[in-house]
Amino acid sequence: MPELPDIEAYALALDRVIGGHTLLWLQLNHPFLLRSVEVPPEAALQSRIVAVQRYGKRIALEFSNNLFYVFHLMIAGRFKWKPESGTGKVAAPGAPPGRSSSKSGVLARLGFESGVLTLTEAGSKRRASLHVVTGAEQAAALSRGGIELLDSGTTLADFNAALQSENHTLKRSLTDPRLFSGIGNSYSDEILFAAQLSPFSMSQSISETEASRLFSAAVDVLREWMDRLLAEAGTKFPTKVTAFRDEMHVHGKHNQPCDVCGTPVQRIRYAENECNYCPTCQTGGKIYADRALSRLLKNDWPRTVEELERLDRPPRT
Ligand SMILES: [Zn+2]
């Protein structure tokens, strides 16, 4: 699932290619994509893009008529960009290309005078979503209210308040969009590794020192990855948006030696989540078996990614 650094990189690249440009045509190929009913998406036609922003794990295109297209890519949704060829053919007003079959994985196409933006989703599950809303307030409400760790005003006290508002495993707390904004499976693994904390420690049981270490690690890891991905997106449209990257330390590194101590990285899979950790650096040498963890996780974790991301869960109290 694209997380904060990936979404920020998309936002930068999208702003570069469609910022200031007018939406000329729109093709929605899949009825399940659009999850809002109040405003028809066609109401944005002939309006200009004035901003592209991240709200949590969502990405919003803001139009000059105050409409927002807010996308959630879920796990397999991706944007593709094809610049206008110069012939005027690609984005000719009122002349979108032939409709793709919904099986092709193309969920939507947006035609601008600068080129065509395509939303694709790999696999057979249709989970990516689009909400069309009016005004920044409604768009921001879709972010679920988790705190923004990279905002300069976010303090350790804010972090602790969010972390300890509910008692969950650290892995689950970090990825809950009601508590923290923009963190999913990959960066939570990397953050917990950097903090040298067990993913299975409970958020209300860790010490002040550990919480402070977790806060610093979260800020550092997100900033490091955001800087890296923004540098790439500043020059070319992101084409390799993946949860698995060579420079990561534990995520996707199952059975490979830990960069710090050489111990093979362990992995626990539960429902749709996975957790990668170094037993020496993070859990005092303890290796958790899937079975031993299942009771802990069963009570702590929603069964699907949708459940964790869904909008009708009550906000943090
Ligand atoms: Zn290690």
Image: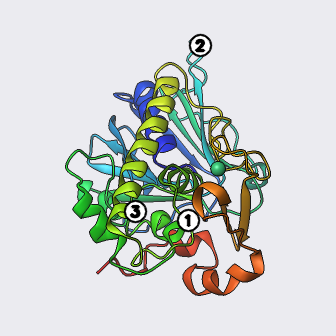
At which x and y percent is residue 101?
Answer: 76, 51
Residue located at (41% from left, 57% from top): 214
| Depth check, front residue: 203 or 9 | 203
| Depth check, front residue: 90 or 147 | 147
- Disc 1 from disc 3: Cα separation: 10 Å
Write down the quadrant of residue 20 in the picture: top left
At which x and y percent is residue 171?
Answer: 53, 66
Check disc 2 and report its element: helix, strand or loop. Answer: loop
Residue 24 lies, with reference to residue 278, above or below; the image says above
Amino acid identity at mark 3: Glu
Q: Label 2 belongs to which residue?
A: 87
Q: Label 1 belongs to which residue?
A: 198
Q: Is residue 22 left or right of residue 288?
A: left
Check disc 1 and report its element: helix, strand or loop. Answer: loop
Write down the quadrant of residue 292 in the picture: bottom right
Q: Is residue 222 visible?
A: yes
